[in-house]
Every structure is written in C-alpha cells, then in structure tokens.
Image (cartoon, helix red, strand yellow):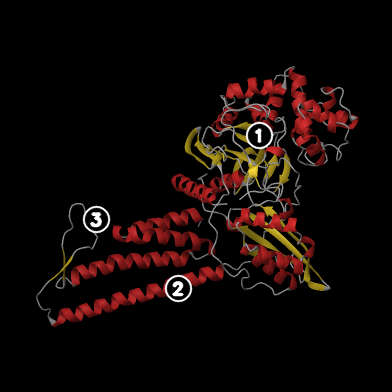
C-alpha cells in the first residue's frame, strides 16, 4: 500500500471520530502517522486508530445508555461546538440502586482497561519507530565529486564539498533539530568512526574554540585561521548536520562513509573520512559531497495550502536568522499564488526589499543567451553544429575556433573554461565589453578535447554573446532586450553598467571573504554583466520569462524542447540542456537555472507537469535563494 493511499485511509478513520476528539487529537495522530509510517508500522497505526474509534463510540454509547441514572447530558447552546461535545454534565440527586452501582463499576473497569491498553500500545509503536531508525545504507548515491570553487559565478547546482563553500553553497527548511547524541547505536566502533563523530560533535556545537581544538589535535592541515573561518561560515549556513546512515560496504577500520542531512535545509551530503592507519587519531581526509535526497528519506508532499504556509514560515525563520534577504514568488499556471519579500535592499539607506526590487541574478542570464542562440538557429542564421570560428573569424586560438561548436558552448562541453580567478580580479575594471574578455583569455587552449566531457564554462557563454552579435548583426544587449525581454514583458530586466544608476537595484551583501559581518559586494562586481551572467531582474519578470518560454512566445515547440530538455548528464537526476538545467527529483521534473556569486543568488524552477513555477531571488551569498527554492519545490503537490 502506498504512503499516499495509507495516509488517506488513516485520515478517513480519524475523521470518523467525534468532532471534539478530532479538534484536540487529529493533528497529533496525523503527525505520528507521517513520522511512523515510513518505518513499516502501518498495521500498528491502523490498529490504534480502530481501537481509538471503538473507545470513542462504544464507551460513549455505554455511558449514555447504561449510566443514565448517574448523568444527564444537557443540550448545548445553539452556538456550541457540536452534537457530541460533553461540555455540560448535570448530576441527578437520587440515590443509585445496587445493580446500577455494580453495572457502573463493571463499565468503569472496562473503560480504564481500554485506556491502559491504549497507553501500552502507543509505547509499543513508539519503540518500533525508534528501532526502525537503524538501517543499512543500500542504494546510497555515490559522491557527486568535488566542485570547483571558482571566485565569481556558479553553475546553478549544489556546492559539492566543504572546500567549495567559499565559492557557493545553499541552506533548508526545518528548524534546527534538538541536540542529540551524534553517535547512534549499531554503528561499528572503528577509529575512523570515532573521529567522524568527534568532528561532528565539535562542528554541530557551533563553538569555534571547540572546533579549532579538534582540528588542531586531529586534522592540523585544516586548522589555520582561514580554514576555521570557512568552517564556521559553513556551520552558519547549514545549521550543522544530523547523521542519518552509514555505508557498510564502503566503511572500514580506517575509513568511514555515510550520509548526513543539513539541519537548516533539505540538503543531504555523503561524507568520507579517512584516518592514518599508523596513527588513527590523525585524520588524513574529510570530504562532504552534496547528493540528491535518497529515496528512503523521501519527503511527503503537502497540500498546496500547507506547503505555502510552511514556505512562509520558513522564509520568516531564515530572514530572522540572517540567512535570507530577498523576494520569493510561487505561481500556478502563470498566476502568482504566493509572493513575499524580506530583508533590506540597501542597509545604509534603510530601503527594504520588495517584489519590484531588482536583484543581480548571476548565471541566470545564461537562459536568455541560450534562448537568443536558439532563436537565430530557428531563423536559419546559424547552425548549432557550426564551429565557433565561422562567426568569430579572428578568434586568437585556432583549436577553439576550429574544434569547438556552438552546441558545445551551449552544453558546457567545449572545454573553454572559466574567466573568474586571479586574472579577472587583476583586470576587473578593464573588462568593459565582451571583446575585452577575448583579448585577455582568447589565446588559451581548450582544457580538454571538445565534446569529451561536461565542465561548467562561463567563458563559453561569453563567447556565445559574441556569436549572437555576429549572427544577428546586433549588439548583444540590444538583441536580448528587443527579442527576449520585450516580447516576454520583462520591463525591469537588463544588464546596464554598474556605474549607471538603476532605480530599485539592490545592494548585494557578502561574507565570502571569510568575515563574520555582511559587507557590500561592490569590489567583486564586473563593470557590466555579460552573456554569461551578471544582469539584474525581478521575481515578476522571471515569471514572465518562464511563461513566455512555456507558451512559445520566444521559440517554436521544437526549439523550446531543444532549449529545455537535458542533453548532457551532469549528476544523478541532473542533465544540462542549453542554458537550462533539467532535473528530476523523486520522479518530479523541473527545468530552469540558478545564479550565484558573492552577494547574489537566484533560482528559477519550472514544473511543466503540475504548472508550478518558483522564483526566489536574494541579495546575499549562495545558497540563500537556492535552498529556499528547494524547500518549497520539495513540498508542493505534483
């Protein structure tokens, strides 16, 4: 029996109870069902519900029919809570005959026996639930690999390791779990396991001194001041971790592998810790790789109303904790059903964020660039199989000009690399046009044979901006403004230079330099956003773009499918299309793209089957917006 059918039948049993009982106990019964049903305790739950139903109606009948000499149930006022409420009870003054006393004693004994049995049964179910938490780690996803930290934008996916946190991350839903023993029972007592749980205890404590002392004693290579600051920032973003399971097949005496879940989000991670065989108190490596939620830990879907209420509460909690500042929008079939904004757009001027605030969107611009390229392909002005050099005829590196195709740039398989890094930081204020980037990076060789593998490439999408210019005969910025923003109705989206005033454009705030206080991200921004990212938009404009894509206002059906359907495997459940990420989680497909850099984070998720669209924008470091989008995306009905 599926969880959804079981819950429906159980809810029907709950609804058969008297109204007064339901008002007081139904929410708790349903909560217990949601907690216990996944641990194969459905039979006990249904038994308990039937027992409760019998107690409520049979005992009620017995009292009303057998003890009528003792009690009179006076009718309630018209505005009373219902027919079966027992608020008013009156006593009869007449003495009881002996048979009535005996009869009442028997019924009372039966009544209290039922209560005792119910209490014993509830304890048994709870014990079964606790024992059920121990499980093998069959089907645990493998690590997604180490993410490249970079120094500017990111690929819209979850960060992969603790080392990558300084570049980009993303936070959850439920509030911090109560303190608990980080080491559950049934875990092999190995040197690697002991070191992991000692680290987890120090990390979860949030005590910088305690964590630093552990690293100094057991992992000295990661105990310098900058590493500690990074770990404490990671602790703030994640809220700590709860241990969920371990991998018996991969674990050994000196290696411990398992899975943990962030306390501040829905995110799961696979950990691997190894210790020195000759000195097992010394950790030689510790990595956390973000992985999709394992099927055994699937979240139950909510009703739309409950999901949106939980989302609002989550955003309020994250904003109060300083982990979210921005705007959020959820739409169904193009109509907003949830909108809200939190935090400050400009802290110095005390300007709050609103739904009309313009947020920098990082790599989300790639969706616009890819759409422009597909429009030109649809018009016959370029072919995706053409080499880049056909359009960039004077491109400095001949291997890129002749071997890399337009399609490979769109799918991040051309080996064209990134442009963020020391060179960018050195020349940031000199890079004013797309051509300026080619002058600085155009002589580089491909990082790998074009088409051989997938590797996120900001530089590749910058080259696509130049391809758009050559194929269309228009300036890139003018092209997307006229052919994408205007027909989609995106009146607040653009990439004007940073030195030009833009009404309602927010200030981004970052801690990614390792500091403990938020500060403006001004010193990290390019002079102007590019075809790879860095423009600005609003939640409403991005919804308008989503609807324009789905309603074929920008491309015909064939090219829309080509644009949004994944072609290249990136990770489990994730494929990259052309400027869009195509994801399937728990059998639910979505497409869109994220963007993030110091002081900016955004997400657009489009769910074609259900008609939902999610937009979350933040003027804080990743993962402020991405984890919020994950939270609501994991709970909406599909």
Q: Could you say which quadrant of the image residue 150 lies in?
A: top right
Is label 3 in a helix, a strand or a loop? loop
- The numbered mark at residue 82 is 3
Q: Residues within 10 Å of mark 1 (few under 14, many from 20)?
A: many
Foreground residue among 212 and 139: 212
Q: Which residue is mark 2?
A: 123
Does residue 248 show up?
no
Where's residue 448, x and y in %?
86, 40
Kindly identify the residue that appears in the image at 85 percent across and 25 percent down: 389
User: Left or right of 231: which side holds 553?
Assistant: left
User: Left or right of 491: which side holds 395?
Assistant: right
Kindly identify the residue that appears in the image at 41 percent across and 75 percent down: 120
- The numbered mark at residue 15 is none
Is label 1 in a helix, a strand or a loop? helix
Q: Residues within 10 Å of mark 2 (few under 14, many from 20)?
A: few
Are discs 2 and 1 less than 8 Å apart at CB?
no
Instruction: Give the mark nearest the N terminus, 2 or 1.
Output: 2
Q: Could you say which quadrant of the image residue 106 lies in?
A: bottom left
Q: Which residue is mark 1?
A: 564
Measured Cα–Cα span from mark 3 to mark 1:
54 Å
Are discs 3 and 1 less than 8 Å apart at CB?
no
Measured Cα–Cα span from mark 3 to mark 2:
32 Å
Foreground residue among 505 and 258: 505
């Amino acid at each position: 029996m599926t969880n959804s059918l079981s819950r429906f039948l159980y809810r029907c049993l709950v609804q058969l109870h008297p109204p007064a009982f339901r008002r007081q106990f139904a929410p708790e019964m349903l909560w217990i069902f949601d907690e216990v049903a996944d641990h194969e305790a459905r039979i006990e739950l249904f038994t308990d519900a039937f027992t409760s139903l019998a107690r409520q109606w049979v005992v009620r009948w017995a009292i009303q029919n057998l003890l009528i000499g003792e009690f009179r149930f006076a009718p309630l006022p018209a505005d009373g809570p219902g027919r079966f409420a027992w608020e008013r009870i009156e006593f009869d003054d007449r003495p009881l005959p002996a048979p009535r006393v005996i009869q009442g004693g028997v019924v009372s004994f039966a009544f209290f026996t039922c209560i005792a049995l119910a209490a014993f049964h509830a304890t048994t179910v709870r014990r079964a639930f606790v024992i059920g938490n121990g499980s093998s780690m069959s089907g645990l996803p493998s690590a997604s690999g180490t993410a490249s930290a970079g120094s500017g934008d990111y690929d819209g996916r979850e960060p992969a390791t603790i080392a990558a946190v300084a570049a980009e991350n993303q936070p959850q839903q439920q509030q911090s779990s109560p303190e608990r023993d980080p080491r559950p029972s049934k875990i092999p007592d190995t040197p690697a396991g002991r070191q992991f749980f000692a680290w987890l205890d120090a990390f979860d404590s949030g005590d910088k001194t305690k964590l630093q002392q552990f690293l100094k004693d057991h992992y000295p290579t990661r105990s310098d001041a900058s590493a500690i600051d990074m770990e404490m920032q990671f602790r703030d973003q994640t809220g700590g971790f709860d241990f969920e399971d371990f991998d018996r097949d991969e674990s050994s005496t000196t290696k411990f592998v398992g899975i943990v879940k962030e306390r501040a989000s829905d995110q799961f991670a696979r950990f691997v810790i190894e210790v020195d065989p000759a000195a097992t108190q010394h950790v030689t490596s510790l990595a956390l790789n973000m992985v999709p939620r394992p099927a055994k830990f699937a979240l139950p879907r909510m009703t739309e109303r409950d999901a949106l209420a939980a989302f609002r509460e989550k955003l309020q909690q994250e904003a109060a904790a300083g982990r979210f500042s921005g705007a959020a929008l959820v739409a169904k079939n193009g109509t907003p059903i949830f909108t809200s904004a939190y935090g400050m757009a400009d802290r110095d001027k005390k300007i709050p964020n609103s739904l009309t605030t313009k947020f920098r969107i990082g790599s989300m611009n790639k969706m616009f660039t890819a759409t422009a390229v597909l429009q030109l392909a649809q018009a016959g002005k370029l072919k995706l199989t053409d080499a880049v050099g056909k359009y960039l005829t004077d491109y400095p590196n001949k291997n890129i000009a002749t071997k890399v195709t337009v399609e490979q740039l769109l799918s991040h398989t051309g080996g064209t690399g990134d442009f963020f890094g020391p060179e960018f930081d050195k020349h940031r204020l000199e890079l004013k046009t797309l051509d300026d980037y080619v002058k600085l990076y155009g002589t580089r060789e491909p990082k790998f044979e074009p088409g051989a593998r997938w590797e996120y490439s900001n530089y590749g999408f910058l080259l696509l901006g130049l391809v758009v210019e050559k194929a269309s005969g228009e300036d890139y910025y003018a092209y997307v403004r006229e052919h994408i923003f205007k027909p989609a109705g995106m009146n607040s989206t653009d990439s004007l230079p940073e030195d030009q005033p833009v009404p309602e454009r927010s200030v981004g705030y970052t801690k990614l330099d390792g500091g403990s206080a938020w500060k403006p991200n001004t010193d990290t921004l390019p002079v102007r956003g590019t075809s790879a990212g860095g423009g600005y938009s609003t939640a409403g404009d991005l919804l308008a773009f989503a609807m324009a894509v789905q309603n074929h206002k920008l491309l015909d059906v064939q090219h829309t499918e080509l644009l949004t359907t994944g072609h290249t495997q990136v990770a489990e459940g994730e494929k990259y299309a052309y400027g869009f990420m195509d994801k399937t989680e728990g059998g639910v497909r979505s497409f869109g793209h994220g963007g993030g850099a110091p002081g900016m984070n955004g997400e657009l998720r489009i769910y074609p089957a259900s008609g939902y669209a999610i937009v979350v924008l933040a003027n804080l470091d990743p993962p402020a917006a991405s984890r919020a989008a994950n939270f609501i995306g994991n709970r909406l009905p599909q």
